Amino acid sequence: MKTMQLYKALGLTDSEYVEILKRLGREPNELETYLFSAMWSEHCGYKHSRKYLSIFPSGGAVSHGENAGGVQIGEHVIVFKVESHNHPSAVEPFQGAATGIGGIVRDILAIGARPIALLDSLKFGKITNNFSKHIFDGVVHGISHYGNCIGVPTVGGEVAFDEAYTDSPLVNVMCVGIVRKDKIRSAAAEAGNVVIAVGSHTGRDGIHGASFASKELNEKSKEDRPSVQIGDPFTKKVLIEATLEILELQEVQSCQDFGAAGLLSSSSEMAFKGECGIDLHLDKVHLREEGMQPWEIMLSESQERMLFVVKQNGVDKVLKIAEKYDIPASIIGETTTHGRYRLFWHGKNVADLPPESLAEGPKYAINEQEPIYIKQYAESKLTKTTPIKNAVEKIVSDPNFASKKWVYRQYDHTVGTRTAIKPGDAGAAGIWIHEEGGVVGITIDSNPRQVFLNPYEGGRYSIWEACRNLISGGFEPLGMTNCLNYGNPEKDEVAYQFVKSVEGLAQGCKEAGIPVASGNVSFYNESPERRVYPTPSIGIVGYVDSPKKMVKSSFNAGETLILIGKDIEETSNVGGSLYQRAFYDFVGGKIDVVDAKLELQLKKILFSLRDSGFISGCVDVSEGGLFGAVFEGVKKANTGFIGNLISINDHEKALFGEITGRYVISTGNSLIVEEFLKLNGVSYRKLGKCEDKKFEFDGYSFDLAKLYDLYDNSIDLEMNE
Amino acid sequence: MKKYKADIIVTLKKGVRDPQGAAVDTVLKRTGIQEIAQVQTGKFFTLDVTGSDETNAKAKLDTICREVLSNPVLESYKVERFVEL
Amino acid sequence: MKKYKADIIVTLKKGVRDPQGAAVDTVLKRTGIQEIAQVQTGKFFTLDVTGSDETNAKAKLDTICREVLSNPVLESYKVERFVEL
Amino acid sequence: MKAGIIVFPGTNCDIDTEKACKYFGWETEFIWHDDTELNKYDIIFLPGGFSYGDYIRAGRLAKFSPAVMSLKDYVKTKRGFLVGICNGFQILCETKLLPGILSTNTNTKFICEEVELEVNHDGFPKSVKFAIAHGEGRYIADEQTLQGIQAKNMIFLRYKNNPNGSVLDIAGLYDKENRIIGMMPHPERGVFSETGNIDGKYFFEMLNKALTKETVAAT
Ligand SMILES: Nc1ncnc2c1ncn2[C@@H]1O[C@H](COP(=O)(O)OP(=O)(O)O)[C@@H](O)[C@H]1O
Ligand SMILES: [Mg+2]
C-alpha cells in the first residue's frame, strides 16, 4: 500500500499526515508511517488530553513524568500509578484484566521499585444483567489469577455497578512499589551504551493494541483478535526478580518496560528523554513467530518484556542474570550521539527519525462549552419516597453498598506479610513499611455521578472523598495518581466533562496539598447506545509513622458515636447520591460543594484526637450517607446501635443523602471529645451508642441479623444463583 | 426432545501465546525427557445437549461453544464427537 | 530418530468431583441456553515426541502423560491421536 | 539452627518465610531449585507460591527440580524437618512424600481469608487462626489412604468451617515418622503483630522447641 493510503487505514488524519511531512521534510516510508500511527494514537500520544493534564500540581512528587511517580518517606520512595485496561477487558475479561495487572506492575518495576500492593477500581453494568455478570466474574478472576501468582497482594479497590457501564466496563488497576531513594531508575538513556531486551519472546500479539484502546467499542471489536494478549504471570514473577537483580548492577544506566506500542514506545521514549540517538537492529530481537516484519516487531505488545540500557562492561552481567532465571535476553542495539532514532533490518537502515517527532505528537484543544444537560439535570427533582424500613434493607443489599467479600476473597491480600489493613477492614488499605516503621495507607475511589452532574465540583469532590478515606484511618495524604475514564473526547459533552473535571481535580489536589505523581487517561469508553459517566479514578497514598496510630473503622459496643463536620439540612444538595440511583434510577439535582477549609480543619482535629487516643474508631461519610457510615462501623465490630440519625423532615435524605466534609467517630470518652470539639469550634452531633444485637434509631427498629445477612451475602447470592 | 452427548476441544488460536505449554516444554527439556516438545494446551469438555432434532441441537451446541466454553477472541473450538443418547 | 505428533486428553477419574464442570453448568443455566448439561471438564494437549521407533516413542509419551500431564491419583489420560511427522 | 528455603521460579512466599525464620533467630538461606545439597539444613521449607506457574496442576512441574528430587534422601539420611506450606504442601503430595492430593476448591475460586483451625498436637493451642490463600486446596485421598492417615494420627490441622471441600476437613498433615509437615494455611503470615495476626508463632515455636532440644542433645 502507498503510504498515502496507509496512513488513513492506520487512523492518522490528513492534518496529522501533513504535520509528519513538515517535521520530516519528506514522505515517511511504510514502516515509519506505522510508527507514527502508533505513537500518535490517543493511547500513547495523549493528543486530546496532554494540553489539560499540565495543570496538575506535581511539586514534591518524585520521578514525576517517568513510568510511575512517587512520594518520599524517609530513605524510601513509595511509587504508584493507576492504569486502565478497559477495552481489552470488555472483549476478553479474564485475560484483559490479567494483562492490566501485568502492565501496571511493569511500570513500577521500571523505576526500580519492588511492587508491594495492588488495588483495583472496577465498574460494570447492573449485576443482574447476565453479560455484566460474565464480565465481572472474568475480570475478578483475571486479577486474582495474575496478582496472586506474582505474589503481590491485592489489598483494596472499589467495585460499582451501573447501567452506564454495561457496554464499556472500566477496569483500572493500581500498583504501589517501594524503592530506596538512591536506587531510583530513570527511563532517560545516555549515549554510548548497549540496549538489551529481556523477557518473553516477541510475537504477533497485541499488535495495534494502542490504537485499539483508542477506539469506540462496537460489534466488530470481538474480531479484533490480535489486540488482546495472554498474560503469563509465572514469567512475570520471574521477570520481577530478574529485573530487580539486574537493576542492582551499577552498570545499568536506564530501564523501560514494554507497554503500549511495545518496543517502539519504550525505545523512542528512552532516546527522547535522554536526548540521545538510538540504533536498533530488529533482526536481533528474539521472536516467537517466524516471518515477523519490522513493523510487527516494533508494535508487538507481547507481555512480560523489559528494556535495559547498559554500559559495555555490564552486558555480560545482565545476560548472566537472565540466564540464571531462564529468561531469554538479546542485545538489540546501542545508544548514540547522532541524536536520531534509527532502525535496522539485516543491516539495512529502514527508519530514520528525530525521536521528538515520535514522542511529541500533536496536541489538540477540545470543546469546553457547557452542554445543555448540565442545567437540565441540575434542575430535575426527585419526588418519590420509600418507607424507611424497606429503604434500609434496599441499601444494605444494593451491590454498590453491600460487602465486596465475594471479590476480595479471591485476591491474595496477605502475601508479602505487609498487610496492616485488609480489604473490608476500612476505607483505605494499609501496607506496613517495616523499612521505615510506619504504615502506608492507600485508597482508590471515584464519584462518577457527582462528576457527571458537575464536572468541576465533582472533581474536587472526588479528591476530598478519597482523602477522607485516608484521614479517617489516621493517614496523612501525600500524593495522588489517577486514571481518567471518559467517552469520546471529540464529542462536545465529553470534552467539557474532561476539561472541567481535570480543573476540579487539580484544584482539589492543591487544596489538599498533594502532588499528582502519575496518571493515565482512557477515552472512547462508549458504544453507540451508551456512554460511561465521566469517571476519574483517584488513587491516593498516605502515611502514618506508627502502626499504633492507625484509627480503626469499627465501632465497638459501649462506645458513643458522634458526627463531626457538616450535617444534612433541608437545603443540602445531595445530587448523585447512591440511594437516588439505586431506588429510583434517578441521577439529578445539584451536588454538595466541598468546603476545603472545613476539610482541612477536620483533618487537624481528627489527627489531634488520634494522637491523644480519645477516639477509637472513625468512618468517613460517603455512599449510603450517614446511615451507611454508622452501619459499616458497627458491622465491622459485629455490634449494633441505638440513637438518632434523622435531623430533617425528608428521612431518606437525612439517612442516605451524600454530602462532603463529615465523619462519624466513636469514643469511650465522649465528654472529653465533645469538650475538645467545642473548644475548637467544630460542629458536631451526638448520634447514640453502640449496643450489641440492636439496631434502632428515631423510632425505627431493625432485625440486625437480617441486615447483616443481606449486606454479607447479596453479591454472593447474585453470582452463585 | 432428543438428547445428544458431545465432546469439545478448545484450543488457542494460532499466534496466541500459550504460557502453560511453554512451561511444560521447559520442564520436559530440563528433565531431559524430550528436547523440543512444542506442547500446546487446550481444554476438553463433555456435555449433554438437547434439541428438537440434530440440527437444532447442533446449533445450540455451537452457541454454547462460542459463548461459554471458548472466547472467539483467543480460542477456537472443535466438536470432536456428537452422538445421540 | 523419528518424530511423532500426539494429542492427549486428560479427564478426571470416575467418582472424582468436577467443580469446574459444575461451574459451567451454572453459567449455562444462568444464560438460559441449556438447563442441565452434565458438563465434565478435562485438559487437552498436543505435543511432539521423538523416538528410535514407534514403540520407543510411545513409551516416552506414556511417561510424559503419567509423570507430567496427569496425576494418576485423580486423572486418567487417553492418547487421541499419534501420527508420524 | 539452620533453615533452608527452596525457591522455584514462581515461588512467592520465600521472603515471607525468611522473615519469619529470622524473627526466631534462625540462620536462613535460600536454596535455588537446581541445588541438591540439602543435608546442611536442620529444617527445609517448601514455601508458598506458584512454582512453574502451577501450570498443569499445582506443584506438578516442580517435582522434577533437582532440589525436590533430593528431598527423599534428606528425609531418610538427614532426618531434618521438611515443611511444605501451601504450594509446598501441593508439591509434597505430588511427589508422594505425603499421601493424597490437592485439587481445585469446590467453589472453583481462589480463597484468601483467615480461617479457624483445630490443632491436633501437644503443646499447641487447640484452636488457632491462620491465613489461607489458595485455589487448589481441596484435600482428596481414597478410603484406604484416609484410613492409613488416621491410623498414623497424621491429621495435624482441620478446618472448623471447611472453605474448600477438603475431605475430613483436612488442612494439614504431619508424618511424624518422617518428620514431614504439609499444610495449606500460612503460619508465616501470622508472626508480626503489625499485620494483625500472631497465631503463626505457635507453629514456629513448636519447630524451634523440637529442634533446639536436638541441637542441645547433639552438642
Ligand atoms: N491523568 C494523568 N495525570 C498525571 N499524569 C499522567 C496522567 N496520564 C498520564 N500521565 C503521565 O504521563 C506519562 C505517560 O503515561 P502512560 O502513557 O500511561 O505511561 P506508560 O506508557 O508507561 O504506560 C506517565 O508519566 C504518567 O504518569
Ligand atoms: Mg511505561
Image (cartoon, coloured by chain):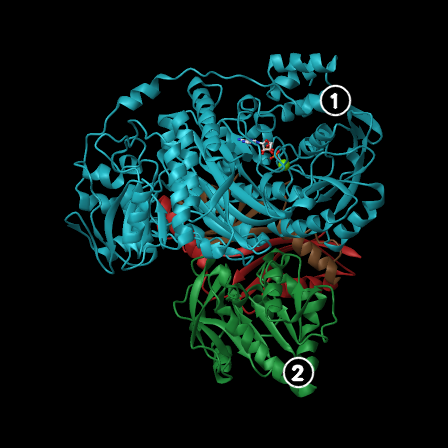
Chain colours: A cyan, B brown, C red, D green
Vertical arrangement, residue D145 with respect to residue A294, above or below: below
Task: Name the residue at 69% across, 30% down.
Answer: A269
Q: Is mark 2 within 8 Å of ligand 2?
A: no
Q: Position of residue D134 (x, y in %)?
A: 51, 60
Co-location on one chain, circles 1 and 2: no
Q: Nearer the viewer, residue A424 or D74?
A: A424
**Res. B85 in view:** no
Q: Which mark is residue A312?
A: none
Q: Nearer the viewer, residue A615 or A324?
A: A615
Residue A564 found in image quarter: top left
Q: Nearer the viewer, residue A179 or B27?
A: A179
Identity of the residue furthest to the left in this view = A699
Judged from the image, the secondary structure of the residue bearing numbered disc 1 is loop
- For marks 1 and 2, give the CA distance: 68 Å
Asked if residue A651 lies left or right of residue A127, the reply is left
Say which amino acid is labelled 2: Thr
Q: Which residue is mark 2?
A: D215
Asked if residue A688 lies left or right of residue A470, the reply is left
Letter of the chain that mark 2 sits on in the rendering: D
Q: Is the C terminus of chain D in the top left, top right, bottom left or bottom right quadrant?
A: bottom right
Q: Position of residue C63 (x, y in %)?
A: 67, 65
Judged from the image, the secondary structure of the residue bearing numbered disc 2 is helix
Q: Which residue is mark 1?
A: A354
- The residue carrying pointer 2 sits among few (fewer than 14), some (14 to 19) or many (20 or more) residues within 10 Å by Cα, namely few
Q: Nearer the viewer, residue A625 or A706?
A: A625
Asked if residue A574 lies left or right of residue D180, the reply is left
Say which amino acid is labelled 1: Pro
Asked if residue A526 lies left or right of residue B40, the reply is left
Vertical arrangement, residue B23 with respect to residue A333, above or below: below
Determine the quadrant in which ligand 1 lies.
top right
